[in-house]
Structure formats: structure tokens, C-alpha cells
Amino acid sequence: MSALQTTGLVKRYGGILVTDNVSLDIRPGELHAIIGPNGAGKSTLINQLSGELVSNSGGVAFHGEDITSLRIDQRARRGLLRSYQITSIFEQFTVRENVTLAALGAREHGFRFWQPLLGRADLAHQADEALTACGLADHAQAPAGDLAYGQRRQLELAMALAAQPKFLLLDEPMAGMSVQESQAVVAMLAGLKGKYAILLIEHDMDAVFALADRISVLVYGKVIFTGTPDEIRAHPEVKTVYLGEEGIEA
Amino acid sequence: MSHTVFKPATLVTLLVLAVLACVPLAAHLADQPFYLAFFARIMIYAIAASALNLALGYGGLVSLGHALFLGIGAYSVAIPAFHGIDNGWLHLLCCVVVCGVVGLVTGAVSLRTTGIGFIMITLAFAQMGYFVFVSLKQYGGDDGTTIAATSKFFGADLGQAGTVYWVALVLLVLVLWWMARLRVAPFGMVLRGARQNPRRINAIGLRSVRYQLAAYVLSAVLCGVAGMLLANLTGFASPSTMTWMISGDLIVMIVLGGIGTVFGPLLGALAFLGLEEVLKMVTEYWMAVFGLAIVLIGVLGKAGIAGLLDGLASRRPASAPAKRAAPAAVTISKPVGEQA
């Protein structure tokens, strides 16, 4: 059974077709990358998959369950977690508070009015694992608003990981990072590969080709081709629309 | 919590509470019952402001209609009393149920909007409540009604100044304690998270609007209980309790004391009502001076009196954290405890 399957997903803004009949089939444990030029509708697609945007038509199934009509919080509770391209953290909370809150959110409700959130040993354990995985263990006490840009991006990922997801939707996790920071994230994602299914949107082609099991090419909201990194490199149409005439050096 | 106990705002609050505990004896010795009623009023407003702080400070829900609940609380004593019912438990039940239902309905509608829309809708609901009670001629209309039978609990009469004073003090302490716990408990964290970034709260699997609505309802009920105490203290209920000026006063108290802080509402209520009283004695143009004082405090400390007090302490060791209070003012204000 697929981890995540979409059938004929459509999103229109007025007369503009932003997502054009997208059908994807992502297997459990697969790292599936989506590439495409700016404005191809990659972020819109992630918003539809995560439940932030309601699709005009088409369906989404998560491990066989139809989740088309579920809200983002309901999808998150089923283990479908996302990260944001534009860092979306709780600036006034510490790094640890951010991650612990994310750990709480995915598994239980927050209607508890007395015991401190940070006093929860089980959540603290999850939070620590996520912080260590993302290289933020030393900054746990820092206010999130004080973090450097790269660290914010790491926190963005840590929050998704702390929720113990089954499936990660990562919207350009390396956007704006330095080369070293990107490499650290690539190494981390390589370590996560296989544990969760991951849908990765990324402009860093080196990272995409190093990590992805399969790649889908999105152009004007339409998936024009899906294949392994080798197939993508060899595909003539992909070369012209996206990779440029020279293509990618293998 | 252990390290926050020693923060200046906390110390000042404990001092204030200790002084408040001595007021009944002092007022008795000095034969000045006025002070008993005066400080009871401050405590009751501090409870109401703390209640509003839950929605406004923790939740970022700027309600300009919380006087509605203060008024409903007052009338849930006055209306049963008018019909000869002086059972305090029934008054309380009436207050909790009506405030809860009204809070649920108005909150659910108001939360469909944010920002100015939210402010306007809460204001509109409060004004509706005001005119409903103005039109109830049998209960005095806009003149209000004297409460002949105040709330009786276990034979104790809440209409006695001494009784309502102690009840208000105990309730205030409990509310402050709970607000301190709640602030860092899951509910408070989700709520404060939703204030900063509701989208992310949803994305981690928690429906932000549900928590905001719950906070709004809790806040409404607690504000209603304050209104109940107020009616017992003054022996009077009137629609004027529900005017938007009172809602505004509550907001000013919170801003003055420190938005989103645990002790800000008490310090703000004390400063607001205390200053008003002092200035009234000095000049009949007290409002002009009062306005200036509020502007001054507003400009001096973005995080209110609580922030000012805690800022004094962190400035002494000349360390960096004190600086951080400034950029936070860009949003609503930096809740002071955050940097602890």
C-alpha cells in the first residue's frame, strides 16, 4: 500500500490552474523529491497535501485512508507532518518549548491546566531526540527568536521530527542555508531516509539527486515525469524544461 | 517556577497580598470602613483583569467586551435577589451557566474574525448586553437595581464588607496561582503559541481556535464571578457595569500592569484604581493627570509595571537579557517571564 497517494488533485485560483490533475504515489519509506521551476506550484501542492489548502477536486489517501476532507490538525495527528519554507516557529518560546509543544500536539490534546508542559518526561525525551538529530541540543534553552537563520531552519525541522511523524512534507528545508548548513541537513535527511516516507521540495539539485529515491518534475502545476534520479537525468523533456540544455553532470 | 519566585514583580505581588491581608484589621482599628470597600474593589477588578488577561494576554484575543460578563455576574445576584432568592450557590450557578453560554456563543462568533474585527464584534456584543439590561424596566432599567438579598453561602453573607473582602482575597490568590501554573501548562503554552503563530499550532496537530474559544469561555466565567463579588460589595447592579468604558478600563489595567504576565493584572488594577483615587483627592481635573500618567507608564515600560520591575533587576548585573524586552513590543508585548 502507498504511504501517500493523490488522485487527480486540482487547485485553481480564479482562472489559473495551479495544481493540474496531480497524481502521485509515494511508497512507505521512500524519499520522493519534487522539482520544478519557480511558480510551478510546488508549495501549493504541499499545502494541499498537508491540509492547509482545500483542493478543488481530486483526492488524497494516507496509508489507505481517505484524508481529502481532513483539516491540517487532523492530518498531523495521523502522522502527516510538514515543515515550512518560510520559518514558522514560536519566537517567544525557547527552542525546547517549541519542540516539546510539537511533540505534544501530534499525540494528545492540550487541555491540561495545571502540570507544566516541560515537566512531562515522555515529551522531553522526544524533544531531546529531535533536538539532537537536528543539531540543536546545545541551544535548547535559547529563545527561538534569538536563533541565527540556519538554526531556525533546523528548529523548523526539529518541530516536525518531534511529532514522531509517519510522513514528512518538507518545503525547501535548505532554503537560504549556507553550504555547510545545507550539508548538515543533507546528512541528517540521509539518516532519516527509510524511517519515514518523505516528500521533499528543494531547489538544491545536488541535495535532491543525492537523497531522492524518485523525483517528480512539476511544471505549470502538472507532473511531467516521475522517475529515479538516473531516469530524470536522461529524460530529454526534463532536460529542456528544467535542468537546462546542459543538464546535470552525473 | 522556582527561579521566578525571586523576581521583583513576584516579590512586589507577595508584598501587596500581605498588605491586603492586613487591610481589614487596619481599617477596623482606624475606623475607616471605606478602605475595606476600596481595596475589595481593587481585588475584584484584579480578578476580572486576570480573567481578561487569560484571553487577551495569553491568547492575544483583544476583547473590548468583557464588561458584559462583569455585568452578567452582577445581575446573576441582582435578578434572583429581586425575586427573593438569596442562595449564593444559585447565584453562582446562574453566573457560571449564563456567562459560560454567552461566552461560548459570542466567542464562537467573534473568533471567526481576528484583529480589529474581533475587537469590534466583542464590543458589539457587550453593547447589545448593555441595552438588553437597560430595557429591563422591572430591574431598574438604566438606573440599575439595589440588591436587597445578597449572596448567602453556608450562612455567611457576601454582602458583608468583611466577608466579601476575604472571599475576594482568597479567590485572587487562587486565581494568581492558577494563572502562574496555567501559563506554562499545556493549555497555556498552546494558547500562547496560538497567539504567536496560529498556523503552526494547527500544523502540529492542535486546532488553535478550539483553545482560543476555551480560553475565552474560561475568561468570561471568571470575569462573571468577579462581577458577582462586585454586586455583593456595592449592593447594587446596573447596566453601567457593562459599558465599553469598563471594558476599556480592564484593558488599561492589563496594559499598565503588563500584558500576558501573571501578576500584571493585579499590579495594573492597583495602580489604576489607586491612582484614580489619589488624583481625585488632589484635583478635580484628575482625568487629565491620570491620562498623562498612563501615557508615561505606557512609554516607559512596554511590558508594563511587571516588566518595569523585572527590568530593574536584570539591569543591575548589566547583562544582555534586559535588552530583549524591546523588540518584543513589535507584536503585542513581550510577556515578561518569557526570558526566564
Image: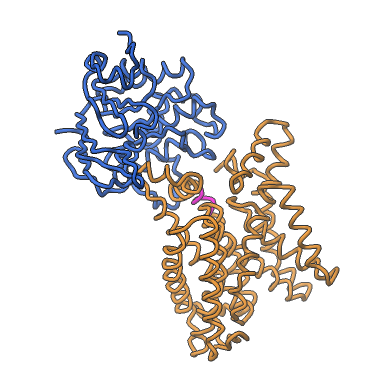
Whether residue B279 is situated above or below residue B16 in the rendered picture: below
- What's the residue at 50%, 53% (across, down)? B59
Where is the N terminus of chain B found, in terms of image quarters? top right
Whether residue B104 is situated above or below residue B114 in the rendered picture: below
Give the percent coordinates (x, y) of residue B60: 53, 53
Give the percent coordinates (x, y) of residue A9: 24, 40
Query: Which quadrant would residue A188 be assigned to in this image?
Result: top left
Give the percent coordinates (x, y) of residue B8: 68, 45
Instruction: Check the rendered structure and report the hue given to chain B.
Output: orange
Extreme residue toward the left, this view:
A1
Describe residue B114's horizontal placement relative to residue A200 as left or right: right
Q: Is residue B174 visible?
A: no
Q: Which residues are magenta?
A: B179-183
Describe residue B106's horizontal placement relative to residue B337 as left or right: left
Where is the C terminus of chain B found, in terms of image quarters? top right
Give the percent coordinates (x, y) of residue B238: 60, 81
Extreme residue toward the top, this view:
A250
Describe residue B11's horizontal placement relative to residue A64 as left or right: right
Residue B117 vs residue B201, the one in the foreground: B117
Q: Is residue B143 magenta?
A: no
Chain in blue in the render: A
Residue B198 vs residue B261, the one in the foreground: B198
